[in-house]
Amino acid sequence: MDEMTILEDFRSAVAPPDPGKLAEARARVAAAAHPGTAHPGTAHPGTAARPRRQWRGPGRARVLSWPRLAISGAVAGAAAVAVIVAMGFPSGGPPLSPGG
């Protein structure tokens, strides 16, 4: 017996939920997900002609901007240069080159 047969047997044995009860559950989940907003998903609803951007809640990824990318690149470049320079200094161990 495969998973699809098991799922079909389960769905045929369980009655579907009442539409009113399902709507009530959806409204409750939407209210819990977006407390205090009249329009779920937006904290500051705009006009119909010009809607505003959606509010970014906690945990949303930020857009990568050029200044942030430049700073990250400069830090990564400085770290790479520091590693390369540090590799050139003797560390007290045996020489790495065969002649040296």
Image (cartoon, rainbow, N blue to C red):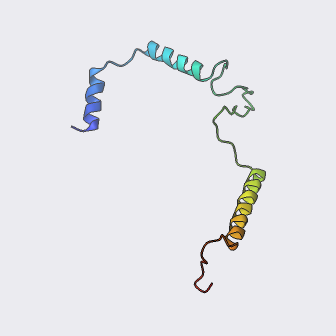
Name the residue furthest right: 67
At x 67% / y 27%, what residue is drawn? 42
Is residue 3 left or right of 61 when viewed as pictured? left
Q: Could you say which is closer to the camera, residue 14 or residue 60?
A: 60
Note whether 46 is above or below 27 in the view shown: below
Find residue 80 and report its image quarter: bottom right
Note whether 16 is above or below 91 in the view shown: above
Q: Position of residue 3 (x, y in %)?
A: 28, 37
Q: Could you say which is closer to the camera, residue 58 or residue 14?
A: 58
Q: Position of residue 38 (x, y in %)?
A: 66, 19
Q: Position of residue 19 (x, y in %)?
A: 43, 16
At x 28% / y 26%, what residue is drawn? 10
Q: Position of residue 60 (x, y in %)?
A: 64, 37
Name the residue furthest left: 1
At x 74% / y 32%, what residue is drawn? 52
Is residue 92 left or right of 6 when viewed as pictured? right
At x 74% / y 62%, what residue is drawn? 78
